[in-house]
Image (cartoon, rainbow, N blue to C red):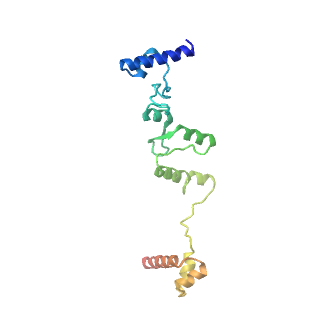
Amino acid sequence: MNAMEKASLCNYSDFLATIFGRDKMEVRKKLGLPYPYGACLNCGEPLKRTNPAFCSRECHQEYAWIKVECEECGKLQDYYAHQIIWARKRGKQNHFFCSKECQGKWFAREYGIGSQYQKDRGIKPIGRQRKHDYQLIGMLVDLKYSDAEISKLLNIPSGSIYSIRKRLMAELVKA
């Protein structure tokens, strides 16, 4: 059957469906004719509109999404297939997580203080680091400098000096 015969048969099937009050898609399916709007990429069902590539949202998700196991907790998480392909091609990401919390736990275990990563590279764990030199500020406070003077000397906001002074006083009280 050539294209002209198929086209005329499609028009005839549409004509029959209209006369007998049947669904055009149903008649075309029974006669084995092509669908006017194409078929769903996932299940092959006929499409009812010209725009979409899938017959339903479920078909789209089944076709485009892949379930990947979380690296930390093992929970299954949906990712678009193109996200996984992109990440693997560029070597950017070989680990997938269900949440930022799981990602943080994994990074802490793999790269955090005392991890195998640090041991392999000879990185020694360091204690808590502070942004400002508390010892120097404590000495200036002992020498009766005001918050404004310390602020100008060290180029630190006076509000920060006030907070540091309070912390130093609390440490002295505890000791």
Residue 152: image x %, image y %?
59, 82
Q: Residue at x 57, y 77 (%)?
A: 156
Q: Nearer the viewer, residue 3 or 117?
A: 3
Q: Nearer the viewer, residue 30 or 149?
A: 30
Give the image quarter of residue 94: top right
Q: Is residue 72 above or below residue 46?
A: below
Viewer can see residue 152: yes
Q: In the picture, which quadrant includes the C terminus?
A: bottom left
Q: Is residue 171 above or below residue 97?
A: below
Residue 80: image x %, image y %?
51, 39
Q: How many marks?
A: 0
Farthest-out residue, top:
1
Farthest-out residue, left:
21
Q: Is residue 10 above or below residue 160?
A: above
Give the image quarter of residue 149: bottom right
Q: In the picture, which quadrant includes the N terminus?
A: top right
Q: Residue at x 52, y 15 (%)?
A: 6
